[in-house]
Amino acid sequence: MSDDSKKTVHLPRWKEDFPTRWEDDQYVTRRDLARFLAIGSALLAGANAAVAVVGRTRQKRVFSPKRIAAIDALSPGEALLFRYPTDDDPCILVRTKPGALVAFSQVCTHLSCAVVYRAADDRLFCPCHNGVFECGEGTNGAAPVAGPPARPLPRIVIEERGDNVFAVGVET
Ligand code: FES
């Protein structure tokens, strides 16, 4: 037996505390990697679905009713401006060509210019960057149809009470 085999090997202190070999520490099995990728992908897909659902869910907020105008104040193809729920919130009431009474925030969802009603095509138009919105009833009543805006205009919930039209809430 040689003298070399009798020598005691002294490991550094840190190796005694962490006896795992460096190569083993870095080793990841294919199964672990596949599991990690599958779980990560599932979490991302779930998060995307949640964002999509929240983004499509419109919220309705109720404010104090406010008289806007007399019901017969507008003929088809006409609009008037009002403010709701505060004096800092410009809105537009439109009697569409088919005769529906609808109201929206006048603040463009792109960069906040004021939209106007264009009777020629029965739509709302933003002159700043040529944004165009539908001008109809229902939750998609003010969906963007052209230009840079990606979100619909907030809809002002209106009610006909007697001979008058009242704003009663905002749907965003
Ligand atoms: S601000 Fe309305 S389209 Fe840009």
Image (cartoon, rainbow, N blue to C red):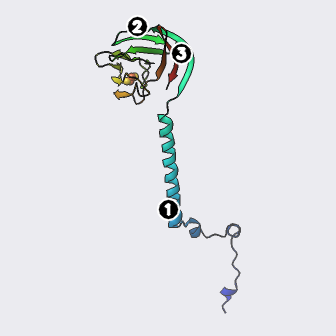
112 sits left or right of 119 in the view: right
Residue at 56 percent of width and 69 percent of height: 23
Q: Residue 21 bears which disc, if any?
A: none
Q: Residue 34 bears which disc, if any?
A: 1
Circle 2 or circle 1, nearest the eye: 2
- Amino acid type of the residue tagged 1 in the rendering: Ala
- Amino acid type of the residue tagged 3 in the rendering: Pro
Residue 103, percent from left and from top: 44, 17
142 sits left or right of 12 in the view: left
Residue that mark 2 sits on? 72
**Could you give the CA–CA distance between mark 1 and mark 3, rounded to whole angstroms?**
53 Å
Q: Residues within 10 Å of mark 1 (few under 14, many from 20)?
A: few
Q: Earlier in the sequence, mark 1 or mark 3?
A: 1
Is the CB of the residue bearing disc 2 within 8 angstroms of ligand 1? Answer: no
Residue at 56 percent of width and 21 percent of height: 62
Residue 94, percent from left and from top: 39, 15
Circle 3 or circle 2, nearest the eye: 2
Q: Nearer the viewer, residue 20 or 10?
A: 20
**Could you give the CA–CA distance between mark 3 and mark 2, rounded to whole angstroms?**
22 Å
Figure quadrant, ligand 1: top left
Residue at 43 percent of width and 9 percent of height: 71
Residue that mark 3 sits on? 85
Circle 1 or circle 3, nearest the eye: 3
Q: As displayed, is residue 111 above or below residue 94?
A: below
Residue 29, percent from left and from top: 53, 67
**Could you give the CA–CA distance between mark 2 and mark 1, rounded to whole angstroms?**
67 Å
Q: Earlier in the sequence, mark 2 or mark 1?
A: 1
Residue at 49 percent of width and 39 percent of height: 53
Q: Residues within 10 Å of mark 2 (few under 14, many from 20)?
A: few
Q: As displayed, is residue 8 above or below residue 77?
A: below
